[in-house]
Image: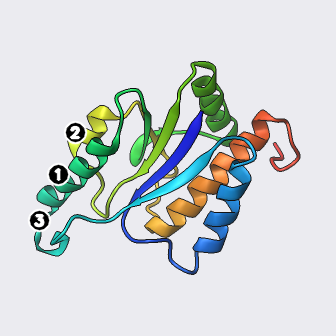
Amino acid sequence: MKIQFWSIGKAHEPYAAPGIEEFTKRIGNYFPVQWQVIPPPKQAAQLGEADLKKAEASLVLNNLQKEDYLVLLDERGKMLDSPGLAALLQQRANESTRKLVFLIGGAYGVDATVMQRADYTWSLSKLVFPHMLVRLILAEQVYRACSILRNEKYHHS
C-alpha cells in the first residue's frame, strides 16, 4: 500500500518543513509515502468561496483514481485515537488498498463533491489548526500509527 498526503496550498513553510520531512521519512520505513502539494487554482484571489472550492475540487478529483481510498481531513469528521488510526491503516492494508490518500483541503474546506467522494472523513480535533500544523500533525500521527502496528516503543499507551 502506498500512502500519499495531499494538501491544497503552498509548499511547506520553513517552520514546519523539517518536522514534516522527518516524519514522512520515518513513515517510509513502513510504507512508500509522498506528499503532493496541490497549488491553488489560478486567480484564486478573485474567486468567491464557493467557486474556489469547486475549482479546488476539480483539481483533487481529476488526480484521484477510482480505486484510491480517500481519507478527508475535516473538522466534522470522525475523531480517532492513535490506536484507531493504526486500525484504519491495518484495515486498508488487509483489504489490499493500493493507494491511501489523506487530503487536507483548502482554506475554506472542500466542496461537497469531494466530501461525497471521500471514503472516510477524519477530524484531528474540534480545534482549527493552520494548514502547516495539520501537515505536521498528520505526518506524525501516521508515523505513530505505523509504530503501533509494529508494536514499537514510540507510542506509549
Q: Residue at x 27, y 60 (%)?
A: 108
Is the C-beta separation of discs 1 and 2 under 8 Å?
yes
Tell me the element at label 1. helix
Q: Which mark is residue 54?
A: 1
Q: Which residue is mark 3?
A: 48
Label 1 neighbour load within 10 Å: few <14, some 14-19, many 20+: some
For residue 121, what is the image quadrant? top left
For residue 66, what is the image quadrant? top left
Q: Position of residue 41 (x, y in %)?
A: 22, 64
Q: Along the line of sight, which residue is nearer the eye, 141 or 62?
A: 62
Residue type, mark 1 in image: Lys
How far apart, in angstroms, are the residues tagged by discs 2 and 3?
17 Å
Q: Is residue 68 left or right of residue 62?
A: right
| Screen quadrant of the N terminus | top right
How far apart, in angstroms, are the residues tagged by discs 1 and 3?
10 Å
Q: Earlier in the sequence, mark 2 or mark 3?
A: 3
Q: Residue at x 36, y 34 (%)?
A: 65
Tell me the element at label 2. helix
Q: Earlier in the sequence, mark 1 or mark 3?
A: 3
